[in-house]
Amino acid sequence: MVKKLNNETDLLKLENQLCFLLYAGSREMTKKYKPLLDELGVTYPQYLVLLLLWEHKTLTVKELGHELYLDSGTLTPMLKRMEQNQIIKRERSIEDERSVLISLTAEGCSLKEKAKDIPIEIFHLSGKKEDEFKALKESLLQLLNQLTNT
């Protein structure tokens, strides 16, 4: 719990750093996903790619990077591993050969059925009521939007 900030020393306490709470919370959340994703044979960042492809079918590397807040230097090696594991396929766009299209293979599509209960599991692990969960997501989205627009 963040104590009232009453002097400069308090500002530099770890417990008063929003960034630390987000960092530690993110690490702990990712740990909760790990056993669920191990059953699918994917990492957490790969799962995020799958979520987007299950929704949109095909996206460019640039679009994936934009949606995931990742640069192509981080995204490309991950996509290559996913292609080697036959989860996705990468193809140059016919309209613009500089653009690489990412889509699911049959294996990637089949993982959707195996993943369908993961969001429910995470909701239960959060210990939040549905309205609290939605409010937390909304608050984090507002923070993300504020940080990306400044």
Image (cartoon, helix red, strand yellow):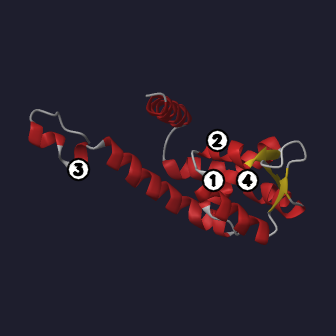
Give the mark toward the camera: 1 or 2.
1
Position of the C terminus by quadrant: top left
Identity of the amino acid at label 2?
A: Glu
Q: Do residues under tags 3 and 1 come within 8 Å of each other at their CB atoms? A: no
Q: Name the residue under label 3.
A: 14
Q: How crowded is mark 1: few (under 14 residues within 10 Å), some or many (20 or more)?
A: some
Q: Where is residue 123 in the image (x, y as percent from the top left)?
A: 57, 47
Cα distance between the residues tagged 4 and 2: 12 Å
Q: Mark 1 points at which residue?
A: 72
The answer to whether residue 98 is visible is: yes
User: Tag on residue 52?
Assistant: none
Cα distance between the residues tagged 4 and 1: 17 Å
What secondary structure is found at the residue carrying circle 1?
helix
Position of residue 66 in the picture relative to residue 145 (left or right): right
The residue closer to the viewer here, 82 or 29, is: 82
Q: Name the residue under label 4.
A: 50
